[in-house]
Amino acid sequence: MTNLRSPLLPDRHPQKDLFVCDIIDAVPKGDMASMEHPVFTLSTKPDMKPRRYQRGDNFIEVSPSRYGLATVHDRDVLIYCISQCMAALNEGRQVTRSMRFKAHDLLVATNRQTSGQGYQLLKDALRRLQGTQIETNIRQGGKEYYRVFGLIESAEIVRETREGRMMDVEITLSDWVFDAIENNHVLTLNKHYFFLRKPLERRLYELARKHCGSQKRWPCGLELLRDKCGSGSTVKEFRRLLSKIIEDDDAHDHMPDYRMTIEGDNVIFRPKAEEAVVALPLQALRLRKLDTHDYARRLAPGWDIYNLEDEWRSWVHDKAIAVKDPDKHFLSFCKKRGPYKNG
């Protein structure tokens, strides 16, 4: 009888379908859904309290693991991963949910300390991101969810020094986050976001970037803003915290892109026009022909053309590209993207 058993040992370490994060100057990007809704806790101490946020028919429930809820500062990891993926897509490279990066590169790109404590804090962030469970029906990239999932599916330290510092880290993003990448459901963030010390400051910037954009103003009621920030403060205390941030910004001009004022029971957000990253629709970058969007849809079928236009403006702005013919340049950008491929 013939022995069908292979004389070779099994491949115990098969190559994974990995995207390697290696773009040094990737522009920071955040997914729109978690910019709009309070997914991350503002607390700097372990937050063990589940939360539910609902507006109309949309809801999101966030539950902690034994390590607590993922924090606003933990979000740095997702921003780094999203930024790397979007930069690679702009270069025509393929990306996957599983990616590998140098821990040091992430720490430097997100303005985090590179000491032993910095690496330990990154480990803690990975635990919370993997353990925080979300249930929502909020759409991300056109999909609706009615299941529980983590912000990242898994995290692995591939190599570690004798001193305990991570060298290579491997992360698999959740479908929810990766759908935002595949559908370009992301927005550019100012790099100074990573210099903001207070979690509430970061959260306010995210909301301003998502809702105000390049509009002249975005008004939001104090109570609604408190809820969108995920703050557990009373409205009175939230007003006080907000007033202090406004006072500090008046003195130091440290908040990127947007200025806030409290007018009655409303908070008004306005772009700092002379420096705002979102003031990208400059006269020179406006599409001038009425049929440009129609041509763009034929060149890049399946993509959201308006999100694609925002991505193009961000790319032109961030790379300081001189554009003589905006319509022609945008169509060339769309042609490189080609048809949208789902999976």
Image (tube, helix red, strand yellow):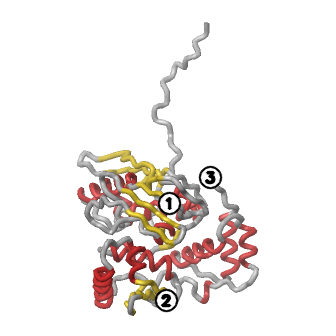
Q: Quadrant of the N terminus?
A: top right
Residue type at mark 1 is: Thr
Q: Are marks 1 and 3 in contact (CB under 8 Å)?
A: no
Q: Nearer the viewer, mark 2 or mark 1?
A: 1
Q: Nearer the viewer, mark 2 or mark 3?
A: 2
Rendering quarter of residue 128: bottom left
Residue occupied by mark 1: 136
Rendering quarter of residue 235: bottom left
Residue occupied by mark 3: 343
Rendering quarter of residue 69: bottom left
Instruction: Write the residue at 54% across / 82% down.
Output: 280
How far apart in space, not on screen, are marks 2 and 3 (Cα)? 38 Å
Answer few, some or many: residues within 10 Å of disc 1's Cα (few below 14, many 20 plus, some between 14 and 19). Answer: some
Residue occupied by mark 2: 217
Q: Position of residue 77 (x, y in %)?
A: 40, 60
Residue type at mark 3 is: Gly
Question: Earlier along the polypeptide chain: callout 2 or callout 3?
Answer: 2
Q: Position of residue 340 (x, y in %)?
A: 67, 61
Local SS, label 3: loop
Question: Earlier along the polypeptide chain: callout 1 or callout 3?
Answer: 1
| As drawn, 14 above or below 18 | above
Answer few, some or many: residues within 10 Å of disc 3's Cα (few below 14, many 20 plus, some between 14 and 19). Answer: few
Answer few, some or many: residues within 10 Å of disc 2's Cα (few below 14, many 20 plus, some between 14 and 19). Answer: some
Which residue ends up furthest to the bottom in the rendered image? 263
